[in-house]
Amino acid sequence: MFIYKEDQGARFGRWADDVSRFLYVDSTETILTKIQIPLRVGDYGGANGNLKRFIPNSISIDIDETKTPDICDNILTHQEKYDLVVLRYVLHYLNDYEVLQLFDAIQATNILVIQFENNNLKDKYHNSQNEFKYFRTTPQLNQLLPTNIEQIYSKEYTVSPSFYKNRLGDGDYKTHKETLGAYYL
């Protein structure tokens, strides 16, 4: 059973459009050059292990068994210790309380957050039909991040209707801007 059917299980993040390529390949390559990758890496909300392309030793932890993660578990209560925890496109699945709970629960020396920020929430919610997520503006996201975290990457990009079509199926989608931010603790 799909927990988030729009994520498409094992196909998650492997859609053939420019936005998916930017989010799941190009930006990740760039961001990871800015930090040292330790041996024990927990990929929280790691879905189908897309991060293994860049960090082969990463351990994907996800609650959705259709994505075939290495460990099927709830990241809010996961107890393993890691040298680095990567939270890539995870925070919009969590309400504000859960985000704060997650940062309190993580047992890691370092944390890398990679998250899109939506300063045009009206168009983002219009495009995200038939899915329930917690999209945030840059200031809203920054209020939830640990105070000692440092921004290491920021890039504005254009989200095309083809991204939403690949992810959510046919619909009346609008082109809009988002910002991708990466934060490191």
Image (cartoon, helix red, strand yellow):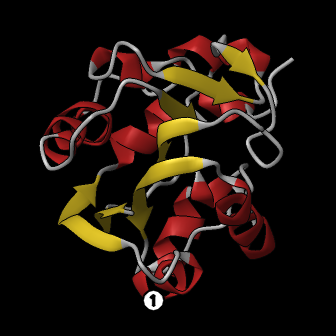
Of residue 89 and residue 182, the one placed in the foreground of this image is 182
Q: Secondary structure at mark 1?
A: helix
| Residue, disc 1 | 139
Residue found at x 77% / y 65%:
101
Q: Nearer the viewer, residue 104 or 169?
A: 104
Would residue 30 be found to the left or right of residue 122 on screen? left
Q: Is residue 74 above or below residue 140?
A: above
Task: Residue at 52% x, 75% y: name it.
Answer: 145
Q: Amino acid at mark 1?
A: Pro
The answer to which image quadrant residue 139 occupies is bottom left
Tell me if I can see residue 177 in this picture: no
* Image quarter of residue 56: top left
- Residue 63 image offset from top left, x and y in percent: 78, 30
Mark 1 crowd level (few <14, some 14–19, many ≥20, 10 Å Cα): few
Q: What quarter of the picture does the N terminus occupy?
A: top right
* Image position, residue 123 (x, y; %): 47, 72
Q: Nearer the viewer, residue 6 or 59?
A: 59
The answer to whether 36 is drawn above or below residue 5 in the figure is: below
Residue 61 in the image, given as x and y percentages of width and height: 65, 27
Q: Residue at x 38, y 40 (%)?
A: 163
Answer left or right for 98 relative to 17: right
Estimate the x, y position of residue 138 in percent, counting from the top left: 41, 81
Tally the numbered discs: 1
The answer to whether residue 103 is visible is yes
Query: What residue is at 45 percent from the left and 53 percent from the top?
Result: 111
160 relative to 98, above or below: above
Image quarter hosting the C terminus: bottom left
Horizontally, is 184 left or right of 128 in the view? left
Compare residues 176 and 57 and report the one nearer the observer: 57
